[in-house]
Amino acid sequence: MVQPAYQRIADELRERIVSGELEPGARLPSRAALAAEYRVADSVALQALRLLASEGLVVGRSGSGTYVREKPELRRLTRSWYRESRDGSPFRADMAAQRKSGGWRAASETAEAPPAIAERLAIAQGDAVMRTRYTFLADDEPVMLSTSWEPLALTGGTDVMLPEDGPYAGRGVTERMRAIGVNVDVATEVVTARAALTAEATELGIPTGALVIVIQRTYTGDRPVETADIIVPVDRYELAYVIPVEP
Amino acid sequence: MVQPAYQRIADELRERIVSGELEPGARLPSRAALAAEYRVADSVALQALRLLASEGLVVGRSGSGTYVREKPELRRLTRSWYRESRDGSPFRADMAAQRKSGGWRAASETAEAPPAIAERLAIAQGDAVMRTRYTFLADDEPVMLSTSWEPLALTGGTDVMLPEDGPYAGRGVTERMRAIGVNVDVATEVVTARAALTAEATELGIPTGALVIVIQRTYTGDRPVETADIIVPVDRYELAYVIPVEP
DNA sequence: TCGAATTTGTGCGTATGTATC
DNA sequence: GGATACATACGCACAAATTCG
């Protein structure tokens, strides 16, 4: 397989970056310099740099140069088997552990279950659900998004129908469900990753197409009671799962 | 903020793809058609399509067209609190559950601990470690990579010094450590995502820069006993964490 | 303070090769 | 074989930001 020139240039730079030879903040050769070094047209050097930028390895600054991406202070989200036992919300606990103020905005509305959500909740497509969109804030900056769905068949007419209103506002799914006599045994988190959509990128203040981790979380007892899509930008957070090993 | 033309084109196509209006396998308008529709030059339409391709949303086929990426059959890796209680290796169990044959190749060698690994193992930089590289196979195709490090101070001179040799070959970290009287309590998995490096991409048969999930797993008892980097292509696998909720 | 040089970001038009239909 | 479409590459142009003397 013959490598196209722009890929070869990108590969060589990528190796130098991940090997640490080019440290975060270091300046890459300019487009013109790369073009001269590799004996290619300016546009080919440009293409190589665009590729690296789309991978999140480098950022260009107009008029200045292209630099190896500085890693922002990485925050950690802990997901462990005792997570719900901590007082209040897991997110606030994580933020507190890192000396950040944690909070969120939320808005709920009723909706019809789309196919993928219906399957996760084991209900019929089009069934009524309560959809709640969350924006999580750390030091007042949006850092994480979540959309949650709960079957109205379960919570309709009860105290806890609105996750962020009433006596159990903000208390977490387990506690709210317990309040209406619904048992919750396990949380399943399916982790994937993709590029951020425009709407997500705008809300989170990251470039469109930046990498995000998507967590599909479902709380289940005798049946699924809540499912959520959680969007986490990879360069701000890492997820830590703590798993006990059975003796 | 004024959006560049190529980004607007990419955004609109991206929305149509993730919303499902353009289903997997559907053909996008040709470059020429896009250029005409948006009144831009051919090269601008090209730039938009390259952006989507770099995000893994579409694939171009020479002479034919650009198509919405078909999702390969998604395999699931289950990570749960009882994972080690299953007989043999977790990977084989996952594969068996999905009617695939699972296996792996491995090669071990001694090495000096690089800084990041030393920190994860709570040893000094440069201390001797046993490094083992794994290639996991499903139906004889490489699907997952892993590199593991164990402090030689712990296993040196014992039966289990080589993870894939001796009486405990392939039996999992917990069991091997128990055999030499070392206790293992918890596994911590730190999940991030990035673009695949050239070497990884080649080995896994995916395009360079394709999205991979990186799991940094550390087994800990009284002290860290093993740590590993596990590379999982996102479009082949999803990770499922099952977390019990405390009553 | 000003201005020139540099550098990135965007965009245009063209050419060649190759795969598909 | 011819038309179509993607992949790569070249060269050029201009705006905007930055740098530096």
Image (cartoon, coloured by chain):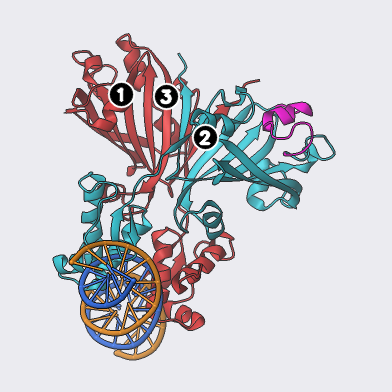
Chain colours: A cyan, B red, C blue, D orange
In front here: A56 or A242?
Answer: A56
Chain letter behind tag 3: B
Could you say where residue B205 lies in the image, as x and y percent from the top left?
31, 51
Give the vertical position of A165 relative to B109 (above or below). Answer: below
Give the letter of the chain under mark 1: B
Tell me the magenta residue range.
A164-183
Q: The disc numbered 2 marks a residue on which chain? A: A
Q: Which residue carries the number 3 mark?
A: B187
Per the image, the residue denoted by label 1 is B121
Q: Where is residue A173 in the image (x, y as percent from the top left)?
A: 68, 33
Q: Is residue A96 magenta?
A: no
Note whether D2 is above or below A91 in the view shown: below
Which percent across, then down, holds residue B238? Answer: 47, 42
Q: Is residue B142 left or right of residue A220?
A: left
Residue nearest the viewer, comparing B47 with B174: B47
Which quadrant of the figure has residue B232? top left
Q: Which of marks 2 and 1 is in front?
A: 2
Query: Are dots 2 and 3 on a single chain?
Result: no
The residue under label 2 is A100
Three-letter code for the amino acid on which mark 2 is drawn: Lys
Can residue B27 be seen here?
no
> Residue A56: x, y in percent?
37, 53
Spatial distance from mark 2 to mark 3, Cα to Cα?
26 Å
Give me the C-alpha separation between circle 2 and circle 1.
28 Å
Q: Is residue B178 visible?
A: yes
